[in-house]
Image: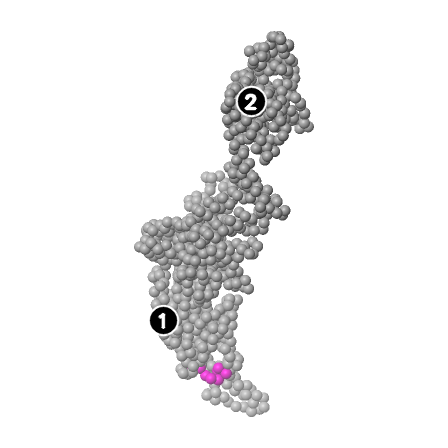
């Protein structure tokens, strides 16, 4: 402890002489003498030491002759205060250059000028801080730093006021006093006591310091004022501050007068906030959050490029926003509305990529096939290149699941260089989801279309309306009807969302809708879209897609490398036939992912159980091992097995998931001449079965191949397997007639033949829909010959040539042609009529034998004739 005290003394016992050693060693202040020249002895507390402990502070500067409190919180500076009290109670107070005061402040972070103060009172606080009451004595300049730790000690040069006695000085003094008198009416710091202190001030310098302290100048201005030694220049600077303070007071008074005219007792709180805001604005200080938000909204409105009509509405809403209180319910509603308006791309467009070759390359890289869609996009770009018409288009992609309808949208946007956004319409039942909610409702929001444009970030984006065929309807409205305006090129340039209530131009947006079926899309909505049908993939296409896209992507997705697993081509083909016959690719992706997961597990398990040298080099997926990877087959080739008997025919059907094959079976049995139908047939299909039965009965009667008695004693049962699946439509009429005719003539249908077509009551074969999907389904199922209506010949031209390879197509205009091509030759066939005759002969023989047996019992013996046998 004694060594520490010696160190502390050494900080102060430096040149120009030891401090506080004795009364005779203390130097006198400037202008005073230490000798006894008629003035008596100099008291120790009247002498300023040459070296001072420095107390850094961020408090307002205490100008000389003033008393003020100082709070000291930092432990280091509290120790400095204690040391100064133990010495002589003098401190050098210097303001820091930084805004924050830290315990580790250095002399370089302090200003050069400060004031020497004397500690009058000290009050220790419970948290360790110290509250001081100090009396400021004189300005000083820091000549040299003697110590930085643990206390900052400096050698000082005390500064005197430079007073010039002149008429100008008297005028300046009077001007200051007059300005202070005017300010005293509005500024609470300029009180009567202060004016009295100014009158009793010992000199003009003291008056200037007193007024400067009352003005509460900013730190930089106060420090600059402290460093001015010339009293004349100090008065000139002070007059500038007084004039500025007077201007602020005048503005404050004007604001107060204007606001007081509208003031009521209920608006007092609002008045005070407005007054504070106006004062800060006049002073150039930072504005509050609401005013800052209003200013930001105004800048965004000017920069958004809104149409004049929309801009007028936005500015009116902004004026409303500025006038309402933060606590008003309308505040957040108006703010959200302005935020939505400003965030929309009113004038933001992306430049189209008009290079057709690059666009085609991007589309080909991302998707296999889909030539119609790609050609339509190339046509769109070609028109844009020839004619600078920024209008968009509306395309509807229709096809089974998994053929790439949704993913092609991203490729289209990338090919033409536009932003892309997708949202689903599936299950939507509220019209407000499309056109937004009106702002009168709590929680109102814009519709999905406006929200999609906002998120896309440009007014010519590519918007995908996914699952448009799955829109619902309820008491809340019909979303499909709301889409009529959105998807109408003649109306969507002035589309009005209920939330915005101002028009927005959607004519430059490229809309792409997707659907699995057109049957559920309302006709007015369908009329506004350009429909492009996407048929399913055939086996060869799926093999190519699996090799080029699906397998490499799944291998990478599951952390494998191409060097670790390989799929044989025969195995890929077998997977399509036995596990993934659907027209799309989703099931194929699932089974490839399953194989990759099992392969990954095998590789990891082997790496944990063996050394690397013993690991197999590559996993090979072979055709004969598929059941080990994927389990039992999901599909079997039923055509050869199910068409072995007369009455079984293979038909072609269209479903929302693509084309498919179905079997129609018929048989006869004892009954009362009725036609029984099973297999969940709809009304239209039931009528088709009735027409087929009527025509076949008539034709068999004309050919004398059916007895009327037989029809009275037997029923005909017609069944379509997969009874849990509802079926409907007229396209099975020809197939049903062929099944019935095959049954009654005993001629079997060719095994790898399928057919479709509507049957009229006079035997004509009428056209049907879904030809492409049906032909692709026949190809996938292994059919080699197809019978189509003659009038559908034009539809076959739309099917790719490679999909028709190894497929023989016949075109029939009458059902007799179908019977001739579909049924096997009559040689060896046993008709129902022949069966009926044989059956009747057997019954007659049995009756005669029974009658003969009864006669023997009675003792009568007869011999059967040759004719009866």
Q: How many callouts does the rendering have?
A: 2
Quadrant (top left/top right/bottom left/bottom right) for the N terminus: top right
Q: Position of residue 541 (x, y in %)?
A: 38, 57
41 part of magenta stretch: no
Inspect this view and state whether residue 372 appears: yes
The residue labelled by disc 1 is 791
Residue 44 vs 632, above or below: the answer is above
Sequence-earlier tag: 2 or 1: 2
Going by the image, does 540 lie left or right of 316? left
Residue toward you, 142 or 464: 142
Q: Position of residue 420 (x, y in %)?
A: 43, 51
Question: At 54% across and 90% down in the image, what residue appears?
Answer: 861
Question: At 48% across and 63% down in the image, what residue appears?
Answer: 481
Do the numbered discs 2 and 1 sit on residues whose CB atoms are within 8 Å? Answer: no
Going by the image, does 657 lie left or right of 32? left
User: What residue occupies the far bottom of the structure in this picture?
Assistant: 860
Q: Position of residue 698 (x, y in %)?
A: 43, 81
Residue 646 vs 124, above or below: the answer is below
Residue toward you, 534 or 825: 534
Residue 648 vs 229, above or below: the answer is below
Q: Callout 2: 10 Å neighbours few (<14), some, many (20+)?
A: many
Question: At 62% across and 26% down in the image, what residue appears?
Answer: 196
Q: Callout 1: 10 Å neighbours few (<14), some, many (20+)?
A: some
- Magenta residues, start to end: 705-712
User: What residue occupies the far front of the structure in this picture?
Assistant: 167
Element class at badge 2: helix
Residue toward you, 639 or 509: 509
Looking at the rendered image, the disc whose residue lies closer to the viewer, 2 or 1, is 2
The residue labelled by disc 2 is 205
Identify the main secondary structure in magenta: helix
708 part of magenta stretch: yes
């Amino acid at each position: 402890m004694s060594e520490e005290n010696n160190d502390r003394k050494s900080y102060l016992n430096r040149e120009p002489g030891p401090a506080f050693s004795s009364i005779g060693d203390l130097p006198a202040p400037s202008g005073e003498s230490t000798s006894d020249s008629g003035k008596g002895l100099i008291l120790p507390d009247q002498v300023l030491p040459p070296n001072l402990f420095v107390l850094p502070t961020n408090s307002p500067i205490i100008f000389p002759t003033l008393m003020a409190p100082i709070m000291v919180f930092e432990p280091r500076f509290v120790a400095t205060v204690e040391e100064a009290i133990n010495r002589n109670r003098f401190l050098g107070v210097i303001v820091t250059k930084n805004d924050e005061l830290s315990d580790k402040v250095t002399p370089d972070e302090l200003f050069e000028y400060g004031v020497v103060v004397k500690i009058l009172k000290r009050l220790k606080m419970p948290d360790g801080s110290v509250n001081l009451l100090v009396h400021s004595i004189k300005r000083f300049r820091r000549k040299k730093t003697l110590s930085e730790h643990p206390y900052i000690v400096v050698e000082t040069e005390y500064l005197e006021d430079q007073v010039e006695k002149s008429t100008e000085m008297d005028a300046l003094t009077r001007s200051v006093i007059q300005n202070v008198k005017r300010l005293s009416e509005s500024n609470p710091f300029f009180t009567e006591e202060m004016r009295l202190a100014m009158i009793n001030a010992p000199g003009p310098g003291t008056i200037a310091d007193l007024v400067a302290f009352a003005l509460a100048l900013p730190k930089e201005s106060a420090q600059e004022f402290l460093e001015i030694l010339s009293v004349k220049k100090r008065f000139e600077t002070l007059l500038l501050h007084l004039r500025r303070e007077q201007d602020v007071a005048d503005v404050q008074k004007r604001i107060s007068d204007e606001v007081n005219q509208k003031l009521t007792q209920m608006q007092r709180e609002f008045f005070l906030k407005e007054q504070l805001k106006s004062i800060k604005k006049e002073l150039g200080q930072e504005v509050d959050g609401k005013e800052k938000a209003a200013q930001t909204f105004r800048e965004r409105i000017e920069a958004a490029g809104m149409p004049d009509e929309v801009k007028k509405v936005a500015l009116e809403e902004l004026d409303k926003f500025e006038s309402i209180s933060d606590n008003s319910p309308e505040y957040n509603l108006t703010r959200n509305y302005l935020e939505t308006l400003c965030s929309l791309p009113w004038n933001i467009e992306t430049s189209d990529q008009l290079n057709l070759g690059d666009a085609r390359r991007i589309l080909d890289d991302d998707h296999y096939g889909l030539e119609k869609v790609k050609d339509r996009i190339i046509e769109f770009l070609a028109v844009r290149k020839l004619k600078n018409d920024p209008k968009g288009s509306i395309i509807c992609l229709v096809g089974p699941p998994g053929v790439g309808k949704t993913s092609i949208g991203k490729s289209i946007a990338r090919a033409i260089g536009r932003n892309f956004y997708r949202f689903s319409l599936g299950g939507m039942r509220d019209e407000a989801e499309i056109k937004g909610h009106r702002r009168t409702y709590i929680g109102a929001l814009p519709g999905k279309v406006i929200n999609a444009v906002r998120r896309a970030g440009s007014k010519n984006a590519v918007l995908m309306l996914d699952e448009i065929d799955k829109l619902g309807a309820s008491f809340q409205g019909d979303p499909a009807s709301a889409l009529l305006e959105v998807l109408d090129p003649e109306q969507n340039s002035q589309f009005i969302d209920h939330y915005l209530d101002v028009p927005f131009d959607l004519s430059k947006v490229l809309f792409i809708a997707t659907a699995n079926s057109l049957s559920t899309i309302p006709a007015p909505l369908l009329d506004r879209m350009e429909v492009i049908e996407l048929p399913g993939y055939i086996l060869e296409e799926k093999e190519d897609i699996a090799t080029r896209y699906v397998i490499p992507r799944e291998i990478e997705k599951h952390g494998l490398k191409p060097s670790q697993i390989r799929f044989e081509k025969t195995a890929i083909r077998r997977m399509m036939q036995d596990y993934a016959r659907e027209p799309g690719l989703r099931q194929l992706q699932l089974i490839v992912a399953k194989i990759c997961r099992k392969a990954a597990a095998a590789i990891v398990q082997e790496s944990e159980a063996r050394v690397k040298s013993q690991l197999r080099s590559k996993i090979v997926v072979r055709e004969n091992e598929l059941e080990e990877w994927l389990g039992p087959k999901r599909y079997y080739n039923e055509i050869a097995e199910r068409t072995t008997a007369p009455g079984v025919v293979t038909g072609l059907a269209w479903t929302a998931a693509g084309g498919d094959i179905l079997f129609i079976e018929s048989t006869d049995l004892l009954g009362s001449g009725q036609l029984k139908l099973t297999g969940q047939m709809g009304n239209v299909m039931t009528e088709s079965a009735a027409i087929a039965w009527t025509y076949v009965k008539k034709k068999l009667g004309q050919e004398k191949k059916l007895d009327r008695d037989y029809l009275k004693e037997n029923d005909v049962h017609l069944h379509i397997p997969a009874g849990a699946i509802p079926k409907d439509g007229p396209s099975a009429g020809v197939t049903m007639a062929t099944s019935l005719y095959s049954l009654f003539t005993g001629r079997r249908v060719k095994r790898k033949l399928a057919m479709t077509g509507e049957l009229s009551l006079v035997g004509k074969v009428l056209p049907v829909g879904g030809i492409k999907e049906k032909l692709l389904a026949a190809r996938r199922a292994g059919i080699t010959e197809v019978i189509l209506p003659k009038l559908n010949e034009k539809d076959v031209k739309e099917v790719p040539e490679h999909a028709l390879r190894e497929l023989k197509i016949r075109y029939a205009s009458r059902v007799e042609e179908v019977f001739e091509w579909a049924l096997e030759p009559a040689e060896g066939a046993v008709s129902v009529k022949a069966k009926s005759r044989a059956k009747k002969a057997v019954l007659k023989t049995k009756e005669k034998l029974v009658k003969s047996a009864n006669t023997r019992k009675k003792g009568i013996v007869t011999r059967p004739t040759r004719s009866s046998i």
